[in-house]
């Protein structure tokens, strides 16, 4: 499944109201570690079913970044039933993301 771009207007429908877990990668285009994290998230999204994957640009969606207290990027949050179920800050390996997702 392709990674979706999430923003202020789609966050509620795509993430909070999702009936499956959602991993959201909070990133910025100027962030080196974020640029390395993106392909790892993309690769995992193609391999795993039953989980949605999204990317949220913190520069374009500052209110969501503030709401979820994203102070460092990349930050990866896993939402289940509309609530944060797991989180990680900094570059994560594919194995690390699998552990975060409980798979």
Image (cartoon, helix red, strand yellow):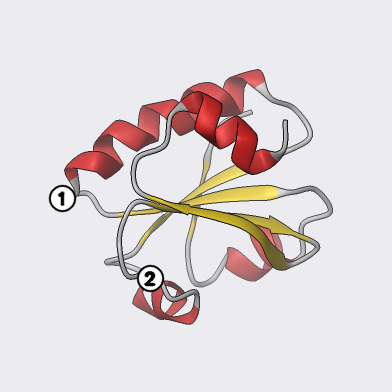
Frontmost residue, 83 versus 58: 83
Q: Is residue 13 visible?
A: yes
Left or right: where does residue 44 sit relative to residue 37?
right
Other residues around mark 1 within 10 Å, as few (<14) / some (14–19) / many (≥20): few
Q: What residue appears at the point 37 percent right and 35 percent down from the top-left corner?
A: 38
Left or right: where does residue 2 sit relative to residue 82?
left
x and y percentages locating residue 91 in the rendered image: 34, 40
* As drawn, 82 above or below 102: below
Left or right: where does residue 68 sit relative to residue 30?
right
Callout 2: SS: loop
Q: What residue appears at the point 58 percent right and 64 percent down from the top-left corner?
A: 10
x and y percentages locating residue 84 in the rendered image: 66, 64
Q: What residue appears at the point 38 percent right and 27 percent down from the top-left corner?
A: 39
Q: What residue appears at the point 34 percent right and 48 percent down from the top-left corner?
A: 90
x and y percentages locating residue 50 in the rendered image: 79, 34
Q: Dot 1 corresponds to which residue?
A: 30
Q: How many marks?
A: 2
Q: Earlier in the sequence, mark 1 or mark 2?
A: 1
Q: Which mark is residue 92?
A: none
Q: Dot 2 corresponds to which residue?
A: 61
């Amino acid at each position: 499944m392709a990674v979706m771009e999430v923003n202020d207007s789609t966050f509620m429908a795509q993430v909070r109201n999702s009936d499956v877990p959602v991993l959201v990668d909070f990133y910025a285009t100027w962030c080196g570690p974020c640029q390395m994290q993106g392909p790892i998230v993309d690769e995992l999204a193609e391999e795993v079913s039953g989980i949605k994957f999204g990317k949220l640009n913190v520069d374009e969606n500052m209110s969501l970044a503030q709401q979820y207290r994203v102070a460092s990027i990349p930050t990866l949050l896993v939402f289940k039933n509309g609530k944060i179920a797991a989180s990680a800050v900094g570059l994560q390996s594919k194995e690390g993301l699998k552990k975060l997702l409980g798979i």
